[in-house]
Amino acid sequence: MERPKHTIQRLFLMNVLILVAVLLALQAVLNVSQIRNGMEQQVREKLCTQAEAIVGRINQRFSSFKLKAEGVALAATSLPHYEEKTLYSILSNHILSDTMIVGGGFWLAPHVYDPEKKFFCGYCDVDAEGTFRIEAGYTDGSYDYTRTEWYQSGVRSIHGASWCGPYRDEVTGVTMITSTCGLWKNGKVEGCVTLDIGLGEVEQYIHGIRVGESGYAFLLQQNGQMIGSGDKTKFPDRITDADYPGIAEIGREILASSELAVYEVDVYGTYAYIIAAPVNVEGIRLVLVAPKADYVGVIHRYIILTFAMVLVVTLALVFAIRSLFQHLIYRPIRELVAASDQIALGRMAEIHTEKRDELGYLASSFQNMSKKLRERNFLLREQYHLLEDRNRALEEALANVESMRVSRDSYKMESETDKLTSLLNKASTRRMAEELLAQLPEGKLAALYILDLDHFKEANDTYGHQYGDLVLQGFAGELKRSFRPTDVIGRFGGDEFVVLLSPLPGREIVEKKAHHLLCVARNLQADGRNAGITVSIGIALAPLQGSSYDELFQAADRCLYKVKEDGRDGYCINLEEPLHPQ
């Protein structure tokens, strides 16, 4: 047969190239996904950097106020004694040095300024025209500022100034924070100094921050109030009071965090990044809100376009590959399958193909195989009929052999067992006991029991022979359940039974079994009533009292006779020491 010239291997390589192209397209999609993720990460990092820069500027501004408060405290504590005019001079120099400082004061501990006067609170501020004025001096004690939070915070600040607020001034309506610093002299606190900082300038700065194309910024107080947001946001005055899903929760999460954090949340219908950064003023966080559409809209459009192009190319390739395989492989294979089905039915099948590739070679092989199968089919039919005749004769012979085996097993069972109890009969008991004793390992013990039912004759005479048979069958069943399948259990005759345990697992089992059999006999039920019998047991041990069946039987029989003399319902292992249950 001529070898094929055009192979499927070439077609396979072509398809592999197409598959590689598809994989490359998929890789491009994955790269686009990576680009999107990378760009989104860059956006988050850029926003974090912007937030850190803004916080840095704010912190730098606030740090200068802390230094001023610490400078005022240092100047005051350097004085030999507190003199009202000098204190106001120190305050005026610092208050007038910065427009954000709207006021300040000295708040001395009780009786520090004057032993005769409890309080001294010198407070100064600047009015609307920029004039420095003194607002307070001595107090009569009706205003105990030492109990205020800002005073307590100041006197606790051993190593520098601390912040209180922010809060909204009731007179001016301006949001302010207070830098408070303790007056420590000779290791003792003598009051504190405060500088009130108006946040109007900070609000204007925050209001002017541009985040992306349409984003904005604001400061968030610990109570949820926003500073500097102006009219750019849809948030309520307190972000924690927002009724839009998720906004209040994000606000509480920002207030609970003390680290820079980035969130992605739906802000009133617009998905946005929210960047929260703590400011070095207790209770204030900077918040940037940047709509995602400002950053990722172009990326999404590019991804959608790329995905659409890849999808179109993939569908086109799939359709082309399907058409190619349909013409070159699938249709010829269907013809070969149809021909195979005909050959399987024993019919000749003509396969016509002009292909000169592997499929054409396979079709020619099928044609030759069809001819040879037809020739062999006739021979196989003849051999089949011959084998069928021989198989039928063999089945008949096997059936005869099985019938003979069943008859033999049935006869053997009838000859070896007691018909009433299905235990071994007397002869079989002797034979199997002798075989078992001959196999007893050296150093091991065996026990031969002779069991005689007490009061069986009375029960038999009282309730009849059928009842007596039930008693014998019930006791025989208990014997089977009480001993191992390898032990010899037989009916010796009448109401006597013989059991051989060989080998014994332990000498103590002999008496345990005897006690058990005594209990079994006393509680034996027959026809729904207690049988009213007991059992007397004689026991002989091999090789202590003999090694043959006859020797053991005679020794056990003597023990049985001793039990009968002693009143029945007991057992005995030797004549010298008869044993009875307690």
Image: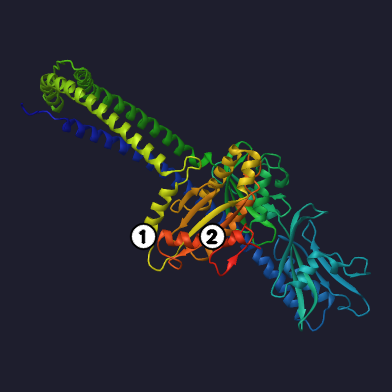
**Placement of the C terminus among the 4 image quadrants:** bottom right
Direction from residue 481 to residue 379 in the image, left or right: left
Q: Position of residue 57 (x, y in %)?
A: 60, 59
Residue at left 74%, top 77%?
75
Of the pair 334 and 144, the residue shown nearer to us: 334
Residue 325 versus residue 62: which sits nearer the camera?
A: 325
Residue 185: % across, % down = 77, 81
Quadrant that contains the N terminus: top left
Q: Measured along the vertical axis of the image, is residue 88 above or below residue 392?
A: below
Indicate the secondary structure of the residue bearing disc 1. Answer: helix
**Residue wearing tag 2:** 538
At numbered mark 2, what does the secondary structure look like: helix, strand or loop?
Answer: strand
Q: Which three-letter amino acid code belongs to the residue tagged 2?
A: Gly
- The quadrant in which residue 6 appears is top left
- The picture places residue 410, in percent across and down from the top left corner, at 38, 37
Q: Say left or right for 260 vs 200.
A: left
Quick check: marks 2 and 1 in contact, CB under 8 Å? Answer: no
Camera sees residue 328: no
| CA neighbours of label 1 inside 10 A, class few (<14), some (14 to 19), many (20+) | few
Q: Which residue is mark 1?
A: 438
